[in-house]
Amino acid sequence: MDAVRVALLREVLAGTEWVQATRRFAGTLRGAVAPHGGGLLLVGSAAYEPWHLAAHLDDEAAWSGLPELSPTLVRHRVPGGAPPHLAVGLGRLAAAGRGETLLVVTPEQPGTGLLERVHDARRNGATVLALDGGDRDLHALAHDALAAPPAVPDGGDEAPADLDLDTVQHLVSAAAGENSLPAPRGHRRFRDRLARLADGLTAPPPPRW
């Protein structure tokens, strides 16, 4: 989802809690990684790998000048021959500690094994964040959490149309890269970012993922 579509989605969601909620959570994420520089670990469930969020955060890290936003994707299963940046297994969570941030993203229950690893990471000093479907056990472990609205039947009005976990991830990643650098010369920094975003719509940086 590009910057224009994110802006349009925010217009659709104006007046709801979601624009503020995703920006608040993105601020927590940015605040957790920026002061420490200990690294951002991103992990999903056994059945869900947050590939797109990893790619979007990587882009935001490059565009915003905040390299700490570029995540390490932690995988439940690492296939043979995977490149180094896609070959990080769950054992990495055992080494997570103070100064690091662990972001757990899953639309389903994370499972006992992952919860135990998340618990160990928090006990060792890592900051734990959750972006999920509202699992109570995961939220109890997280320092901050944001639950996406549940899927509703056609015609339901509990949540805006098409607002699911994937969409919430786009909003969070976009907000995480906003306003992360000072603007010492009036609006130049803002213009520079707009230029980078415009360039990105036609020629995005080469994907790592």
Image (cartoon, rainbow, N blue to C red):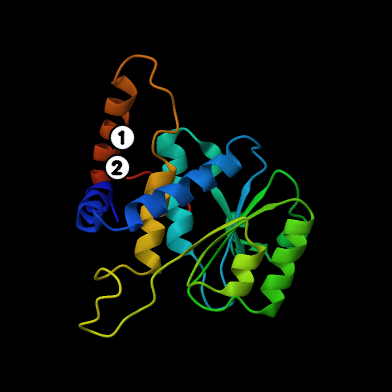
Q: Residue at x 72, y 61 (%)?
A: 93
Q: Circle 2 sits on which residue? A: 200
Q: Circle 1 sits on which residue? A: 196
The image position of residue 142, as x and y in percent, is 62, 60
In the drawing, does residue 125 fall left or right of residue 50? right
Name the residue type under label 2. Answer: Gly
The image position of residue 178, as x and y in percent, is 39, 38
Cα gap from disc 1 to disc 2, whole angstroms: 6 Å
Q: Is residue 117 visible in this depiction of the protein? A: yes
In the drawing, does residue 185 fall left or right of residue 12? right
Position of the N terminus, as image quadrant, is: bottom left
Crowding near pointer 1: few (<14 within 10 Å), some, many (20+)?
A: some
Q: Residue at x 42, y 61 (%)?
A: 52
Name the residue type under label 1. Answer: Arg
In the drawing, does residue 61 fall left or right of residue 8? right
The image position of residue 40, as x and y in percent, is 60, 49
At numbered mark 1, what does the secondary structure look like: helix, strand or loop? helix
Image position of 133 with respect to 42: above or below? below
CB within 8 Å, label 1 to label 2:
yes
Q: Is residue 77 visible in this depiction of the protein? A: no
The image position of residue 154, as x and y in percent, is 23, 84
Image position of 122 with respect to 79: above or below? above
Image position of 66 with respect to 50: above or below? above
Nearest the eye: 57 or 129: 129
Q: Residue at x 61, y 69 (%)?
A: 138
Q: Quadrant of residue 88?
A: bottom right
Q: Residue at x 26, y 68 (%)?
A: 160
Q: Quadrant of residue 189?
A: top left
